[in-house]
Image (cartoon, grey):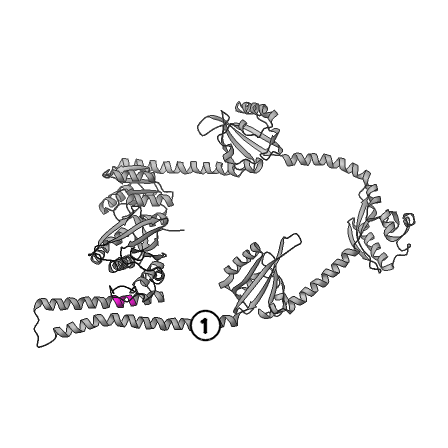
Amino acid sequence: MNSALILVVEDDSSIAEDIRNRLKGMGYEILVVHTGEDAIRHAGEIAPDLLLIDINLQGNIDGVETAAYISSRWDIPLIYLTDYSDETKLEESKATSPMAYLTKPLKDRELQINIEMALRRHRIGNLQKASEEKYKAIFENSRDAIFCIDEQGTIVDVNHALENSFGYKKAEVMDKHFAEIELAIPEMKEEMIGLYEKALAGKLNYWVYSEIIHKDGRRIFIESCHDPIKLENGKRGILVIMRDVTRRKEAEQAIIERNELLNAQNEQLRAIEEYSPEAVARVDRHHRHLYVNAAQAKSTGIPQDEWIGKTSRELGFPKDICTLGENAIDEVFRTGKAKRLEISFPDGQSFDSILSPELDTEGKVKAVISSSRDITARKQIENELRQSREALRASLEASPYAIGVMNLQGIITYVSPQTIRMFGYENVEEMLGRNLSDFVAETSREKTAHNFQEILREGISRDTEYDALKKDGTPFAASISAAVIRDVSGKPISIIGFTKDITDRKRAEEEEARSRALEELDRMKTALLASVSHELRTPLTSIKGLASTLLQPDVSWDHQTQQEFLYEIDQAANRLTYIVSDLIDMSQLEAGTMRMENMPIKLSTILNKINRQLTTATQKHKFEIKAAYDLPIIDCDEVRIGHVITNLVSNAASYSDEGTTITLEARRAGEKIEVSVTDRGIGIAQNELERVFDRFYRLETGVTRRRGGSGLGLSICKGIIERHGGKIWAESHEGKGSRFTFTLPAYKIFDD
């Protein structure tokens, strides 16, 4: 029995049920769906082994589109069901690489054979692909340079290790004869060709050591092996693996040279000791001097011959210094390890001494060699630097700013007392060793991390505001300026920051902003009352007047007049409905409560549904629609987007003369669609363009009022488009017309 899972996509329920029963009888697992959307959703959820789909599938997404999308996301073989009635559709389907086409009505044997062949071909293809990927991974990730060369000597493939080892990029050697690449030393080029011919004949079964030329002109040593292979086209070739062994050769040569150097050094050692500017002495385990050089004698004022056989105590050196030296000598004899010692004399002289063991042939310490350097001047400089640092620390600790130093990873290494107080800590230990982000509120961590990298890159930053974090978790407003601290070579070693608590300043700014907001709210309220009261009064007056006229008891109106009055009442009521609807939509947008009933849909479907509204709005104009053929499906609320389009077209008609052209265009713009409405009307002044999407804004200057309304239409359009993740803008030239454009993202199913 077969266990393969087949997803059947057929919009004809009877045919789908027939296919289900046939395939179940053959032992397959079956899932039947009737639309492209359901097929896409189930393909991702159940991962079927085969897709059996009607090429002429009805609905928003046809069979070829559905198959193309599934093939682009999942590795699922597919078979089309067709009646060969649509040659164009068959031609389009070839791009999806189907395994077969089955003609309706289906025959059981033909159906089963094609399914089994498709499943088998898919399994074989996956195995071959896995094998190829494994070979490619080994080939590309090898540290050795690998060439594939055909029997004419042309390089047909090479991995990227070639560039790391020999300096040549892959593109520089591909499809060239190997002898054209200037790897070979000129006098050895014939030998290289001979090795290739020998390898092609299968007579070169050992590693070859040779010298070649790097692209930069250096000579390097390599070892290479050459094996005959069969290329993808079935012809003979060889696989060459080349490995750079220059370092190994250099190491071998270095050993030889080191041995020669050691022999020379033994001869020179005595001379170096004697003429060294450092004081050198050799001492036995009883602290007696076996040898001192001229520098030792000069620095102490004691002739060389008077040192021999005597200890430092016997020569009259201070007792505490003698004890320090003797303990160090004893430690070197005991441990066999060198020791560093700093000695300071009462007269201010200081010496840095290194005591090293001198070993006999058995590896035992037979003497201690001391080498001492006068560091008196250096110690004086260190004392001055120490005093300077103390002065700097005092000034930092007295600063009203919170000052901190951190390493290049953002770890705190120093904080001033003001920093401890500002952040609410009790002592310095609570802050040292922690990351800068521990003292930054969550709302500012991304900004602070970006600023930290900018400081490293630029070397300095001006005041940057952020939300700091006290020990108890309370955030507070702060500003920081920082600079990079560099060593003497100019290399960054740390960052110093100066932080200021700006809570009071931010509070004052917030009060000022609140005051401005209240003023703006008052202005909007005034604008709302002015706009809405006027727009409501006009239709209400009309309704009241006409209704009162109809209700007069002493007048009898004929049927036609009554109908005209009722029509005017209905139109006025519609205007009231539009105004109230705009107010509700605007309040929902501002409160974030407007619901969007999004679904995948074509723009053409939306246009078809609002065709009557568009035709009515433009009945006195020439209206044309230009839509590109490759528009993608969009994910949107069709009613809301239809409202946006209708509003833009109605505005275009209201502000352009009768008989002029209004054009609605739609095109693809990358992963978006772009829709624009263009008129040949009065246009908008450049200084007015930024305000056309403001609430209650009306373009009234210099024109007779052309349409009523709340003044919220374009503001609502902007809110709807932005809720869909798009943008909307206006372009215009006075006296020539305007273009309003918005974008919407293309629909992405199961976007990762």
Q: Residues within 10 Å of mark 1 (few under 14, many from 20)?
A: few
Q: Residue at x 18, y 67 (%)?
A: 570
User: Number of marks in the image?
Assistant: 1
Camera-nearest residue between 557 and 229: 557
- When the figure is inspected, residue 279 is found, relative to residue 250, above or below; the finding is below
State yes or no: residue 213 in magenta.
Answer: no
Residue 391 appears at what percent x and percent y? 69, 65
Q: Where in the figure is residue 179, as x and y percent of width and height?
A: 54, 27
Q: Residue at x 55, y 58 (%)?
A: 452
Question: Under tag 1, what secondary structure?
Answer: helix
Q: Name the residue tied to disc 1.
A: 512
User: In the figure, is residue 138 to the left or right of 531?
Assistant: right
Q: Which of the two residues, 726 or 149, is positioned nearer the viewer here?
A: 726
| Whether residue 7 is visible | no
Q: Is residue 651 left or right of residue 559?
A: right
Q: Which quadrant of the figure has residue 514?
A: bottom left
Horizontal side, residue 185 vs residue 556: left or right: right
From this viewpoint, is residue 115 visible? yes
Instruction: State the predominant SS element of the stretch in magenta.
Output: helix
| Residue 537 position within the rendered picture, expressed as x and y whole percent measured from the top left | 23, 72
- Asked if 695 appears above or below 243 in the picture, the reply is below
Residue 228 lies, with reference to residue 707, above or below; the image says: above
**Residue type at numbered disc 1:** Glu
Q: Which residues are magenta?
A: 578-583
Q: Is residue 281 above or below residue 617?
A: above
Residue 386, how many percent across, how many down? 72, 61
Which one is nearer the viewer's eye here, 516 or 120? 516
For residue 320, which quarter of the picture? bottom right
Q: Quadrant of the N terminus?
A: top left
Residue 427 sits in quarter: bottom right
